[in-house]
Amino acid sequence: MKYLLKRLGFYAVAAVFAVTLNFLLPRLMPGDAAGALFARFQGKLSPEALEALRRAIGISDGPLWKQYLDYLWGLAHGDLGTSIMQFPAPVLQVVWTGLGWTVLVAGLALVLGFVIGTALGILAGWRRGGLIDTVLPPLLAFVGAFPYFWLAMGLLFLFGFELKLVPLRHAYADGSTPAFTFSFIADVARHAALPIITVIIATLGGWMMGMRSAMVAVLGTEYLALGRAKGLSSLRLAWRYAARNALLPNVTSLGMSLGFVLGGSLLTEVVFSYPGLGFLMVQAVRSQDFPVMQGLFVMITFAVLTANALVDVVTTVIDPRTRSRES
Amino acid sequence: MLVVLALGCRPERAKAPAGVLTLTAVEQQATWLRNFNPLMPGPRFPSQSGIYEPLAIYNSVTGEWVPWLATAWEWRDDANTLAFTIRQNVRFSDGQPLTAEDVAFTFELLRRYPALDQKAVWKFLDSVKAEGPGEVVLRFKRPFVPGFMALAHQPIVPKHVWKDVENPVTFTDPNPIATGPFTQVRLFQNQVYELGRNPDYWQPGKPAIDALRLPAFPGNDQANLALIDGELDWAANYVPAIDRVYVSRDANHHYWFPPMGTTVMLYANTTRAPFADANVRKALSMSIDRALMVDVAMSHYTVPADATALSALYERWRDPTAVKEGDWVRFDVAGANALLDAARLPRGPDGLRRGGDGKPLTFTIAVVNGWSDWVRAAQVIARGMKKIGITASVHLLDQGTWFQQLQRGDFELAVGWSIEGAAPYEFYRWLMSADTVLPVGTAAPGNWHRYASAAAAPVFTELEHTVDPAREKELEAQLQHLFVAEAPVIPLFPNPAWGEFNTTRFKGFPDAQHPWAALSPNKLPDVLLVLTALEPVTLPDGGAP
């Protein structure tokens, strides 16, 4: 318990630090949002419009400490400000449109990748030199070495454009109404399939290799030899004895990745025109939309911290040694 | 399960129903949020030209003013007053008639909320009054004839709706009440929205198409894929190798890229030596191989600029004698060297030219990182400058940094855009008029190179109160001659106005053979001319393709 409290204290400090950094960083960038919006028109807006734009967006020129206090006050009330590129929509509304889709695609891809990759790693580690162990690692390493962007574009071109098996973009067919009907869910699945599959293909190798080497290390330990000598079943040895211990490093990296899910699988969303947070972030940075940028970063920060706190809890459950200091 | 679903049910392509035109324009968003406020600037083009409408439309291709919500206009009282006659029988989409009151109210809104006054019309306006239901009289603080375009292009909103809007700046106008051809928001989702036709549009029988559908595309690549796939009927994308990629795929695929966009310029900061000297600027210009530039940077989609710097947008103003005088846009290394020798920038023993301080001349060319056409253009410039003994390095900057440096005059050389207006007056004013020059260090919205032409000042002033078209043309020609003589900036090439269309389902688009209007849906408010002219294609049996 003391251990967990200590960890929570650490997370609170990290959160304050991150929030402050989050406030400062965008303000250190050169240029301003009105300029970015103006630049997008490349001479189509009259120069007088620049002044009007500044006035409309209401860019704050107050002293930095005052902006910081306003920012903290807003944050405490769940007010993330007003978006500039989608003026006058509140940031929360802008972010909300993408949140569900990102969680669906990035989350599902992460969980599936982790589960499949880890299972494959366990099998490969257990049956070293077997079929899975000889064929999959080099194959997955090969596929994983492709730049993700290239891989996703290539698959989209092949399956979406040439073979017309999957849609080219978006989270569901244009014009269909979101509802809990089989046809709509099937439609969403059809749109999400290729994005999810590409992420799994690209990340599977990492999970599998990590799990495999951890397994190999654990399999060499003496308690496994003892278990074998005691005559435990192969299955029990592989899963309860070896895999449970070997899982720890993978769970830690799962925690890290879980936090980044909210950041969106940025490239995935751009390639598949998927309406998630990742693309929103690219766009916010490009248009210097500070409020949206900050809103996203705050969310990612808290997601990463929360995920890590959860991992800490899970680790204490799986691995009794982390609890040992208090007993 | 996903795989089974994905591969098991073969999806029918999301094809728009007959009569629904699918298009994409300048706005690229991952998701749409509902906002149709026409008074705020923003790239959602149908708000300003589609849902709402202006008083008159300048047809940038023919150079004519097309009466729209106003049937006529007249300058009175030595150009101190402008009167618009408002069209009768125009109704807003809630059935209420459009009157002069609505027009006066719209301008009144701009006065009360300066954030809405995008064209700064209240700099020269004094008052706007409705005289009866059919006439609006605008009184000026001083004669300013070039302000006509800003006034005529102002989208008009209904008084009976907007008078109750608490803050028109933050109003999102989710269910617009307007006069335009497409006023009915039939569908609004984060991925797509549809605007249905206004059943009581004032032009009888128009629009002939049922609805506009605008899908959200995060970028050009995704939009191009949909265009090539035949899903988009109309687009304004940059498409590389368009003949092979798009046109050759289907006989109904067409494009038209007239060079009538902004003229891309090389800005030389005239507050820094040696760029204050017109001959040095001309020599720089002569060292540039524009034919090569148009090839490597623009894949031959445009043509080199002439010395008036005017794009095809100003074709009817172009003065052939000024074009002929402007020999400094021709690629002529020997001529450039001769000019620099005369400007006392001698070559050292290493072949590099020395400035007044005896040090070799080295400059940076600021361009936006990732705007690859400009980056390649800057590389061609640097190559040419090497031939005349000047070292130039291409400086790739983030868009924000680049724009900030440009505005503050904190650069040596930079590639940038220029202003698009109805007449050369507005274009040249932001390139060489004293009243647009701001001190270095202050953010200037234009005239980034800080150049004031003394000879042009009286011409600008006279143009501001000239109503007579013949005299106006003379004065605009004088400006061109002055620009050619003084070379305030170095024109590179006019940008093409991108436009593609697919005639499988709709017909009536303008193109190079039928140049009756601009094709690009990014050209506002010209787009209204096309939107009201398009018709669905019907098969011989009466059905839709």
Image (cartoon, rainbow, N blue to C red):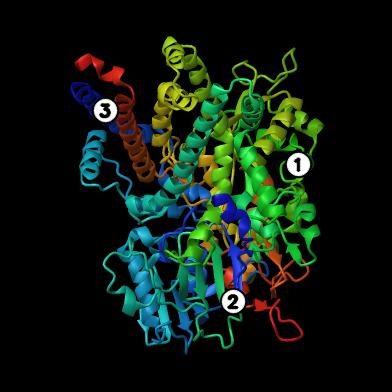
- Going by the numbered disc 2, the residue's amino acid type is Val
Judged from the image, the secondary structure of the residue bearing numbered disc 3 is helix
User: Closer to the N terminus: mark 1 or mark 2?
Assistant: 2
Q: In the displayed structure, would residue B22 be above or below residue A290?
A: below
Height in image: B414 above or below B178? above
Q: Which mark is residue A19?
A: none
Q: Is residue A274 visible?
A: yes
Q: Picture coordinates of residue B53 (x, y %)?
A: 49, 74
Tell me the tag on residue B290.
1
Separation of marks 3 and 1 at Cα, in angstroms: 59 Å
Residues under numbered marks 3 and 1 in contact, where contact means CB atoms less than 8 Å apart? no
SS at mark 1 in the image: helix
Res B348 → quadrant: top right
Find residue B114 and report its horizontal and vertical position in percent: 34, 59
- Kind of residue indicated by mark 3: Tyr
Q: Residues within 10 Å of mark 1 (few under 14, many from 20)?
A: many
Which is in the foreground here, disc 3 or disc 1? 3
Q: Which residue is tagged 2? A: B66
Instruction: Name the residue rendered at 28%, 64% in the picture.
Output: B167
Q: Nearer the viewer, residue A233 or B17?
A: A233
Determine crowd level at label 3: few under 14, some 14-19, many 20+ residues with C-alpha closer than 10 A: some
Instruction: Out of B298 and B126, give the one closest to the viewer.
Output: B298
From where the camera sits, is residue B459 visible?
no
State the mark number for residue A11: 3
Residue type beneath disc 1: Arg
Which chain does tag 3 point to? Answer: A
